[in-house]
Amino acid sequence: MTTILRDWSYRYQWLYDTVSWFATLSVGGEQQFRQLPLAGLTIRPETQILDLCCGAGHTTRLLLQYSQQVTGLDASPKALDRARQQAPTATYIKAFAEQMPFADHTFDLVHSSAAMHEMAPGQLQQIFKEVYRVLKPGGIFAMVDIHRANNPWMRAGLMVFITIFETETAWQLLATDLPQQLAKVGFQPVQQWLYAGNSVQVIQAVKPPFSSAGT
């Protein structure tokens, strides 16, 4: 169960931006939050990047600072319209993350920023399989999202945030071992870093260099 503020945050860009700003203060702000999954990665101008569930395009705009080959995918036409305004030089595709209209081995990097907590457990497994399929051998899936906090203050803040702005899928993600789920799909190695009292998790998962798609 959630509140009307969730609907408003998607309807009004200024409210979404305000919520994002407050929610990311614990890691140094929204810009730093979006940078976290990219730490240590080598990204060149020709790197093929998929911004998965790109939303309004804030991270898409950031990714374009690294590469000119960025594709944003989202199921919401309204979100894609906003993304085109934020980052007009990217390519945009309207589609569901669990049914991506891309050929096998298309991307060097798939990036996801605070999107997986919107997905039900069954969706997550299918999305991870699709990410694995569209990545080139040796490609990387880099993501940042919420995590069960061990700091009492962070845990309280996260619970309030989820109650007001999120749905039951966010609670389900807190109970999900994402590295384990990614390893089941075939990613190896899978690295996880925790920030802000464990309330934020960053994952970089590698598709093995000689893997075949869909395995």
Image (cartoon, rainbow, N blue to C red):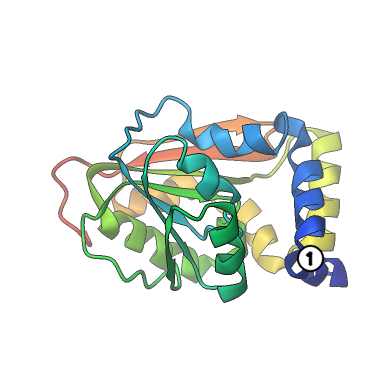
**From this viewpoint, is residue 1 visible?**
no
**Callout 1: SS:** loop
Q: Position of residue 122 (x, y in %)?
A: 48, 70
Residue 31, percent from left and from top: 64, 35
* Residue at figure coordinates x 65%, y 65% from the top left: 169
Instruction: Report the front residue among 57 and 35.
Output: 57
Q: Judge whether 189 appears above or below 148 on screen.
A: above
Quadrant for residue 129, please give it. bottom left
Residue reaching furthest to the top: 40
Q: Is residue 171 above or below residue 191?
A: below
To which residue does mark 1 refer? Answer: 12
Q: Is residue 4 left or right of residue 204?
A: right
Left or right: residue 196 compared with residue 34: right
What's the residue at 39%, 58% (across, down)?
128
Q: In percent of the image, x 34 and y 63: which residue is there? A: 130
- Give the image location of residue 61, x and y in percent: 53, 46
Vertical order, 181 against 21 (above or below) = below
Residue 172: name its quadrant.
bottom right
